[in-house]
Image (cartoon, helix red, strand yellow):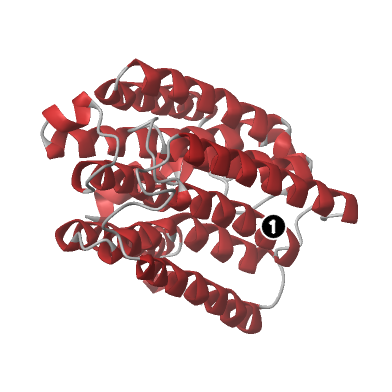
Amino acid sequence: MLHWVRKAAPMLKLTRVTTGFGAVGNLWFVILWSRTTQGEHLPAYLNDEPLWAALIGGLLVGLGLYAFGAALNDLLDLHKDRALGSPGHPIVDGSASLELAVCAVAGSLMLAILGATFFGTGAILLTIVLAVAILIFNALGKFVPGMGMVMLSVIYAGHMMVPNVWIRFLIPVWLVMTHAMAVLALAQYLGRRSPPISRRAAIFAISGWLLCSLLLLALAWDRQWAGGLWPDGVPMSAMIYPGVFVVLFVLFIIRRTKRHGQGPQLDERITRYGAIWPTLYGGGWLMGAGHIQEALLMTGLSALGFLSMTVLRELYALIEQPVGYRL
């Protein structure tokens, strides 16, 4: 197994596929919610095709867009990372070639578009728009913290809607959008990234979040359910499960900050775990709505994501520094 991981390690590091499970979880939630919730808008392609086909499409879109952004980040930041001698970047440390990075960017984008074909023309167009937004974010947005936080949150909200562009229940989309902005803000501040978040950037980010929240609310109102913005048959107590996971994430950040202190190490952990956390929100919404089997599927995806992230991290350590030679 170690042999195959060693062969695949450069591509796995470039694409960060293990942390891409969070993106997959967002799409799977929309697929499962659309198919199981009474009164939800259910497109013909989600109703007619087998569940496994829809989930494969969500897998391709989620991993494809996430890998596209991750590989593009390493490619565009190559000169800066070389100048700073940044560790953990496969192109900089020589474990991945420039050609491999270009192939990863192109290949992951094609996979994402291929996955979007499972969900119709609107999904394909939205995937292309998201790819352009990811390009702008990596080329410019992340260097302007205020704009970057707003852009990333919108990208997460948009990619979640790929399987069902006309989904009516948009509160989970808002939660993921807010979570994405919070993760980037915490990573930027506690991880001591450069440039730091200025007061002007913070005001811009909060204003952008408020504007996007109002737009989502207006969109939800336009697509409203027969009884209002909340789905019929789903108890209001369903918010408890996602709320618990929000509290757990806050406690996780506090604990990691006390353990590691502020700096790059904390930045890496916030980014890594924050990316996969939305799968827990999706499972919580489904559990609260009474869709037990679907919630268990999301829980299994979360467990797989956390497990693969941990196992691959240990295998990378074995490859780079075999046990017999560790000091």
Q: Residue at x 51, y 55 (%)?
A: 175
Which residue occupies 72% across, 72% down? 262
Q: Is residue 98 above or below residue 303?
A: above
Answer left or right for 97 relative to 186: left
Residue flagged by tag 1: what amino acid is it?
Ala
The answer to whether any part of residue 104 appears in the image is: yes
- Is residue 67 at all visible to an observer of this figure? no
To which residue does mark 1 refer? Answer: 185
Residue 24, position as x, y percentages in the image: 35, 45
Q: Measured from the top left, where is residue 188 in percent x and y?
A: 72, 57
State left or right for residue 322 relative to residue 234.
right
* Residue appearing at x 37%, y 43% in the figure: 225
- Residue 253 falls in image quadrant: bottom right
Nearest the viewer among 234 and 23 is 234
Residue at the image point whose x is 26% and y is 65% from the top:
287
Q: Quadrant of the N terminus?
A: bottom left
Q: Residues within 10 Å of mark 1 (few under 14, many from 20)?
A: many
**In the picture provided, is 107 more to the left or to the right than 183?**
left
Q: Nearer the viewer, residue 213 or 7?
A: 213
* x then y, percent, for residue 269: 55, 65
